[in-house]
Amino acid sequence: MNKVYIALGSNLGDRQANLMSAIIHLRTSGVSVKRCSSIWETEPVGITDQPWFFNAVTEAETEMYPIELLRLMKRIEQAMGREHIEVNGPRIIDIDLLFYGNESMQSEDLELPHPRLQERRFVLQPMMELAPDFQHPVSGLSIKELLGAAPPLEMTKFGP
């Protein structure tokens, strides 16, 4: 089994239910979700004239290869009604593979670790709850160190 970290985001419809639905889809498709961060409500990045996001990160295990997992995540997004209308635009669900163990790879379809991870406080903050000492396989920096250097972003923990 390979340990993976998967980011989830939603800013359309019932955002919390969308995140939960994505986790259920992952679990019923061969991904063993072990833990999930708190849900964080975050301001949008890039296109700011859109609803705020709910974001979370899951720690999971899978026997799938990285590209298989990526294809599964894209199928789940499609099944949940995701439309790719504009980059960084509103979406019912966004599922991103952040880390696949300590793998580092680059292909036409997939780059690991996620190439913009260090810029995304909305991913680093939830991941901090799960694995603050996890080291980025390329930079060697911990999640805690990456979060400390990430651009500011307005975000609050949703719920208790």
Image (cartoon, rainbow, N blue to C red):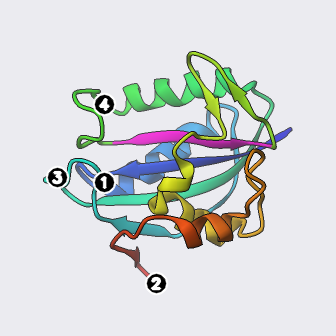
Are the two marked residues, 1 and 2, in contact with CB atoms closer than 8 angstroms? Answer: no
Circle nearer the viewer, 1 or 3 = 1
Please rate how many residues cluster around mark 3, counting C-alpha atoms within 10 Å: few if below 14, some from 14 to 19, many from 20: some
Looking at the rendered structure, the kind of residue marked 2 is Pro
- The percent position of residue 24, horizontal first and vertical second, equals 54, 44
Q: Give the magenta part as a residue range.
A: 93-101
Return the residue at label 3. 50
Give residue 45's mark. Answer: 1
Secondary element at tag 1:
loop
Are the two marked residues, 4 and 3, in contact with CB atoms closer than 8 angstroms? Answer: no
Looking at the rendered structure, the kind of residue marked 1 is Val
Among numbered discs 1 and 4, the one appearing first in the sequence: 1
Return the residue at label 4. 81
Secondary element at tag 3:
loop
Are the two marked residues, 4 and 2, in contact with CB atoms closer than 8 angstroms? Answer: no
Among numbered discs 4 and 3, the one appearing first in the sequence: 3
**Gap in angstroms between the C-alphas marked 4 and 2:** 29 Å
Give residue 160's mark. Answer: 2
Left or right of residue 115: residue 13: left
